[in-house]
Amino acid sequence: MGILEDKSRARLFYKYLSRVYDRVNPFIWNERMRTDALDLLDIDADDRVLDVGCGTGFGTEGILEHTDEVYGLDQSPHQLGKAREKLGDDPVQFCLGDAERLPFESDSFDVVWSSGSIEYWPNPVDALEECRRVARPGGHVLVVGPNYPRSSIFQKLADAIMLFYDEDDADRMFAAAGFEDVEHVTMGPGYNPEIAITTVARVPA
């Protein structure tokens, strides 16, 4: 387990990163990538969407282009504070919470989205099970995470920091969490078009 796959360390990390996050983030996760990920979903104007690990609201902002009924959850009060500054609490409903214990009723959302959060989850299968629980039967869950590097040197560095994974790892995690029709797309900025792995899966009907 990487050093940032610890909730208290991750909260401390984002206490300071939140001050510059929106300036750093575009080098790793930019608007074109967000659009490409959203294009993998079919979000209707009346769909209810949850953004798990919403951070400063970058993914949330893109979701708002498709529907007004959006919820954002993050374990970092500092990241949520930045999201509220940008987007307000209307129409987005932000809440402080844990991906492994989502404070929502089962079958509450048409779509569950999570970008740049799974790498910090100590128990990713548990959190994916929670995403499946709160999504309606037949609904979709989309997760964007860091693709496992090919270089052995970078693999050792990645393993020491947080969760990096490849398509086979994602298949195992999503299958263990009870999903069906799991598909993956790699994406990234120009300097590394495979830096991120985006997975879309369906909740069994």
Image: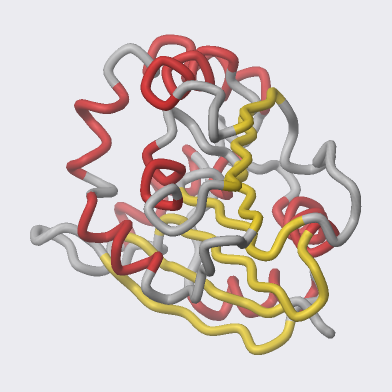
Quadrant holding the C terminus: bottom right
* Residue occupying the point 40% across, 65% down: 38
**Left or right, residue 180 beside residue 2:** right
Please identify the quarter of the rendering in which residue 173 is found.
Answer: bottom right
Please identify the quarter of the rendering in which residue 17 is found.
Answer: top left
Quadrant holding the N terminus: top right
* Residue occupying the point 62% across, 54% down: 49
**Left or right, residue 78 beside residue 109:** left
* Residue occupying the point 30% across, 68% down: 36
Question: How many numbered discs, if any?
Answer: 0
Q: Is residue 16 above or below residue 191?
A: above
Percent of width and height locating residue 190: 9, 61
User: Between 179 and 87, which is closer to the camera in this rendering?
Assistant: 87
Farthest-out residue, bottom: 181
**Left or right, residue 131 beside residue 49:** right
Q: Is residue 47 above or below residue 159?
A: below
User: Between 86 and 189, which is closer to the camera in this rendering?
Assistant: 86
Percent of width and height locating residue 171: 63, 79
Percent of width and height locating residue 184: 47, 79
* Residue occupying the point 53% across, 69% down: 44
Farthest-out residue, right: 105
Percent of width and height locating residue 48: 65, 55
Q: Is residue 63 above or below residue 188?
A: above
Give the colour scheme of this rendering.
secondary structure
Farthest-out residue, front: 46
**Left or right, residue 30 beside residue 173:** left
